[in-house]
Image (spheres, coloured by chain):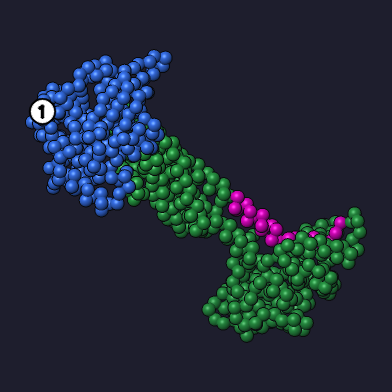
Amino acid sequence: MSDVISLTDIRRVFTMGDQQFEALKGISFGVAAGEFVAIMGASGSGKSTCMNIVGCLDRPTSGQYLLDGLDVGAMDPNQLADIRNKKLGFVFQGFNLLARTPAVENVELPLVYAGLHAKERRQKALIAMEQVGLAGKENNHPSQLSGGQQQRVAIARALVNNPAVILADEPTGNLDSTTSEEIMVLFTALNKNGITIIMVTHEHDVAAYAGRQITFKDGKIISDSPTGRTV
Amino acid sequence: MDFSQTLKIALRALRTNKMRSFLTMLGIIIGIAAVIAMMAVGTGASYVISQQIASIGSNIILVIPGSTTSGGLRTGSGGAQTLSNDDVKAIMNECPSVSTASGTVRSSGQIVYGNMNWSTVIMGGTPELFEIREWPVTSGRSITQQDVDSAGKVCLLGQTVADNLFGSADPIGNIVRIKKIPFTVIGILESKGQSPQGTDQDDTVFVPLRTAQRNLVRSQRAGIVGAIIVKAKSKEVIDKAESEIQSLLNQRHRITNGKEPDFSTRNLSEILAVAEKSAKAMSLLLGAVASISLIVGGIGIMNIMLVSVTERTREIGIRMAIGAKKNDILLQFMTEAVLLTMLGGVIGIALGAGGATIVSRLLGWPTMISVQSVIIAFFFSAAVGIFFGFYPARKAAGLNPIDALRYE
């Protein structure tokens, strides 16, 4: 199977005044469809920069990034917004739901920007919410949901567009260990259904749920190996 | 992204901070209300003036005699007895820009009916006078040429005179005494209200010109008129008619170069046009002052929108991460700002209209709310939203999604 994500010699240089800082020093890796990859590394190792590039929120200074066969590096901000909307699903550490907005409308949000009609949006959102086990909580506002439930809403929001890849940035960082486990079980289940997941974490027991671990240090990959868990 | 969704998001954002939204809107509400109320007062004033102009009749030129000196005392202008019936005829016949003319004489005196009496202005005129002043009778008949030729003892009463002498009774056919001479009332004139100078135009009695010349005024010669009222053929030829009259009368009165004319002409509508113009300028000035408050209100909107963008940086980041384009964000914040100002505009229009009505009730000022000013106010409030909302919205749309997501 061809790679969904393919990074070739990605470099990212930040310029602050006359100082230059190379956050990524030539990263290359591919992610095949259906993989569950954990990216690890200390803070400042370049893993967040790498995730921003993979998430099309940032563009590499040099190197080639193919997402689902499309050369993302050459796209303008509007095209990138489109790619984020259609090809990617984001799950953040802080859930990042819109307050005072019912759960189901949070889930619908990507479809709003995709230009779908209200009826179709609601239908897809309800399916996504069922997938993450939140049927019946559609009209609850985020403040009326527990942390685990809020993260499930965020996952449903990431799923709703049928993205090529789900990007999770420390998805369990704000959750207690029991809830973390539930969320990881959910991720594993989604992955079994064929969804590609790339997850940033610094917790080894969380990373152990993934089928492959990539470890960053000082802007380079120092290890890339299967965890032994069969996917 | 469809607009109904944008609208929904904007409404939700405004509802979230109800008090803040209301206070921000208040600037626009006050501004628009002030504009509407001021325009209403101004428009009302110029409407009254144009009504008064219409009440005098249109395209009118007044010819009055000059002053005279008798025994070392100079009379004021109009004191000389230099204009005659023949001058009137000449003006009608020889000035091509003149539509018609009437000589008038004016006196004042007591008018008596039964045990009632009333002091009023007595005017003598020909049938043309009522044509020029566009002044029909409401009952009975007007003065005819025959009345003039025969110096008939008939009179038309102004509404005020009729009310004071007859109350609710029908005056027509009754005999009244004007300066002790009996006259038959043949008609009641339509009410004209106040003149631009503030006198009651209905407090007048009209008699045929010749009757007045013979019986009611003292003059050195027969056929003297106190003034000539002339109607020009159209608004465009008023000035031409005026100079035609001047050269005709100069010739007839043998006024050669360098000699002071024994008459003067006045173009009434011109005077009133100036009054109308100044009323319009006044209302514009009031509107301009009021619109300053609109600009202040607009700055308030901009301020709050900037705060709102900062507060919602994270939300903007989320929206961008899941696929909102720059234009989506721009439109969202613009919609919010325009919604604020348009809502404020609508409330302001209602408040301004209400305020204008209260002012006209309490102070008795004439106010008029024109549809035009309402439409202008509405679109102006929208324009304020677009103008002052653009900078904050652009700021929001220009945010970097990575920074916005990380914003605490």
On the picture, is B30 further left or further right than B372? left
Chain whose colour in the figure is green: B
* B248, above or below A84, in the image: below
Name the spot of residue B228 as percent of width and height, x first: 77, 68
- Observer-nearest of B194 and B61: B61
> Chain A in the picture: what colour?
blue
- Asked whether residue B204 is in view, the answer is yes
Q: Residue furthest left?
A: A178
Most common SS among magenta residues = helix
**Residue nearer the viewer, B234 or B15:** B15
Q: Which of the 4 image quadrants contains residue B225?
A: bottom right
Range covered by the magenta-colored residues: B260-281
Farthest residue in the bottom direction?
Answer: B173
The residue to which callout 1 is attached is A229
Work out which residue is located at the far top of the displayed protein and give it: A19
Residue displayed at 19% across by 35% down: A34
**SS for tag 1?**
loop
Q: Is residue B280 magenta?
A: yes
Residue at figure coordinates x 27%, y 20% from the top left = A46
Q: Is residue A146 visible?
A: no
Quarter of the figure with the C terminus of chain A: top left
- Residue B261 location, x and y as percent? 85, 59
**Position of residue A132 measured from the top left corner of the image (x, y, whole percent):** 14, 41
The quarter holding residue B115 reads bottom right
User: Is residue B375 in the magenta section?
Assistant: no
Which residue is rendered at x = 58% and y = 57% of the image?
A: B46
Relative horizontal placement of residue A136, taking residue B343 as reference (left or right): left
